[in-house]
């Protein structure tokens, strides 16, 4: 499941290096992030100065959950993490307690970002290190060129939908726009050839009776 966090109020409890990574990921997703902690890393302090996140100096209070859509507890205090998890559970708020899968209602995957393409890897909290290793492998296999190619495929899909009136023919074209050969061309960095192959599929199938 991918969540749309744009303009959603999210709370991160904790201001250390782990919290910093979680906050950065939430901001990348367009969330409205509030951090509660007695102190912050220099990078989180800079994000506060830039207005990228909100900050309340201090310790967690149940009122911090008011209006919140999602919570990440990234403190090094097991008792505090337990209280936060319990409060979220009673209020039906999604909660992720870092390094404590038993208290999580969701897990944060390791993600490869290629524009609209997202490749998410999760071990259900059992081995974040393994998820990281797999992510790094996928980053090499699915290079930056995939961002451009996915945008191109999206444009082609819209073109097919708007220009091909026959539902049967339209579905046939969409089904065959991309195949294993095209995927390999993109992986090898031959974007132009991959695009030409997609266009050929479109024109060939459109002209068929």
Image: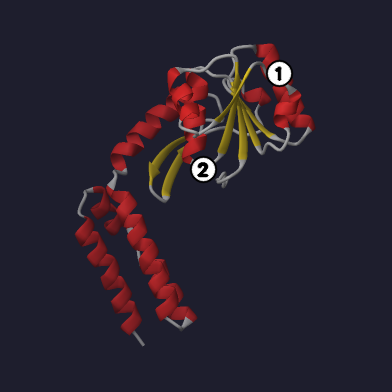
Task: Kindly identify the residue that appears in the image at 23 percent across and 56 percent down.
Answer: 191
Would residue 117 be found to the left or right of residue 109 on screen? left
Q: Residue at x 70, y 12 (%)?
A: 79
Can residue 107 be seen from the camera position used here? yes
**Discs 2/1, front:** 2
What is the number of the mark on residue 30?
A: 2
**Quarter that holds the C terminus:** bottom left
Asked which secondary structure carries label 1, the reply is: helix
* Image position, residue 53 (x, y; %): 53, 32
- Label drawn at residue 183: none
Q: Is residue 39 above or below residue 204?
A: above
Classify the position of the N terminus by image quarter: top right
- Dot 1, crowdedness within 10 Å: few (<14), some or many (≥20)? some
Q: Nearer the viewer, residue 152 or 20?
A: 20
35 vs 117, left or right, is: right
- Residue 26 in the image, given as x and y percentages of width and height: 52, 36
Q: Position of residue 137 (x, y in %)?
A: 33, 34
Residue tagged 1: 82
Identify which residue is drawn at 38% across, 48% down. 115
At label 2, counting other C-alpha atoms closer than 10 Å, the crowd grade (few under 14, some 14-19, many 20 or more) is: some
**Secondary structure of residue under mark 2:** loop
């Amino acid at each position: 499941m991918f969540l749309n966090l744009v303009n959603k109020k999210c709370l991160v409890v904790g201001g250390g290096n782990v919290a910093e990574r979680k906050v950065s990921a939430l901001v990348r997703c367009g969330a409205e992030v509030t951090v509660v902690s007695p102190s912050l890393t220099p990078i989180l302090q800079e994000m506060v100065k830039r207005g990228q996140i909100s900050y309340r100096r201090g310790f967690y209070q149940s009122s911090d959950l008011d209006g919140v859509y999602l919570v990440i507890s990234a403190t090094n205090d097991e008792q505090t993490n337990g209280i936060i998890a319990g409060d979220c559970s009673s209020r039906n708020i999604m909660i992720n307690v870092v390094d404590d899968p038993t208290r999580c209602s969701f897990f944060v995957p390791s993600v490869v970002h290629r524009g609209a393409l997202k490749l998410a890897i999760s071990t259900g909290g059992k081995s974040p290190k393994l998820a990281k290793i797999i992510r790094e492998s996928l980053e090499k296999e699915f290079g930056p060129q995939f961002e451009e190619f996915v945008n191109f495929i999206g444009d082609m899909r819209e073109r097919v939908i708007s220009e091909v009136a026959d539902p049967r023919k339209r579905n046939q074209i969409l089904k065959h726009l991309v195949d294993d050969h095209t995927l390999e061309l993109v992986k090898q960095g031959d974007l132009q050839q991959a695009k030409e192959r997609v266009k050929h599929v479109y024109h060939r199938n459109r002209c068929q009776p």
